[in-house]
Amino acid sequence: MTTAFFRQLAAQFSLVLLLFIPVGAAQANTADTLLVLGDSISAAYGINEEQGWVQLLRERLQEKGKKVRVVNASISGETTSGGLTRLPRLMEEYNPRWLIVELGGNDGLRGYPLQSLQRNLMEMVKLAKNSGAEVLLLGMRIPPNYGRAYTSAFAAVYPKVAKSEQVGLVPFFLETVALAEGAMQADGIHPTAKAQPALLDHVWPCVESLLADEVDSQSCTP
């Protein structure tokens, strides 16, 4: 038998396989990917993963008929350095169209140099943008026990990065829950299950802008 015969047979076999692929699977393969790179707050620390804001985001996108695959690459205890180290592999593996970065809180709680925090965030944003992804940055703030100078400078890093790199920004991700009754776990750092819908509502306008490719450093500021 000739090589041409085997090529024709392979083509016919591939066509038969395509006919048996479920419609849902084909649609899933065509969905664009939204990658969430965060720490314990996005990893649903202390609560069931199904209750976390990232899972609630999946559900809301599905309810609104948006074909978006949400990948949660968040790890409890993650720092901006760890996120920067992992991001190249994640970008290669998932090829996301959009990236949400929720990192830096652990850097601040450990008193890491703010120059490193800013540099790592900028490098993550640049890496994502160079890969063709749009970025949304979720800012953090830390308790005042590190001193007013450090905490103020920490909070200012996120607007600086967003302005420099022209990406979307939520200045303080926990703004609507940080002082709300019953919204924080006993450690005072991690939101409860009750607070997760409020977290999603806080970032939702920015996520909508991100998915519409209309996000910039100003439009996502509450």
Image (tube, rainbow, N blue to C red):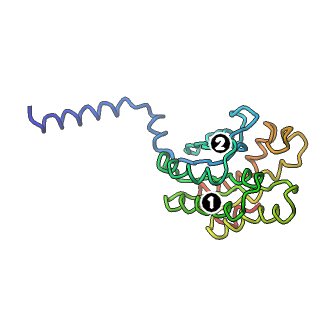
Name the residue type under label 1: Asn
Quarter of the rendering containing residue 168: bottom right
53 relative to 85, above or below: above
Quarter of the rendering containing residue 23: top left
Q: Residue at x 72, y 54 (%)?
A: 107
Q: Residue at x 56, y 52 (%)?
A: 85
The location of residue 70, given as percent across then percent down, is: 58, 43
Most extreme residue toward the right, as rendered? 181
Front residue of 53/212: it is 53
The location of residue 130, given as percent across then percent down, is: 50, 62
- N-terminal of the pair, mark 1 or mark 2, is 2
The residue singled out by tag 1 in the image is 120
136 left or right of 202 in image: left
Most extreme residue toward the left, as rendered? 1
Q: Residue at x 85, y 49 (%)?
A: 178
The location of residue 15, given as percent across then percent down, is: 29, 35
The residue singled out by tag 2 in the image is 75
Q: Which quadrant of the figure contains the N terminus?
A: top left
108 relative to 180, above or below: below
Say which element carries label 1: helix
Front residue of 4/140: it is 140
Marker count (numbered): 2
186 relative to 111, above or below: above
Q: Residues within 10 Å of mark 1 (few under 14, many from 20)?
A: many
Q: Residue at x 72, y 31 (%)?
A: 48
**CA–CA distance between discs 1 and 2?**
17 Å
Say which element carries label 2: loop
Q: Residues within 10 Å of mark 2 (few under 14, many from 20)?
A: some
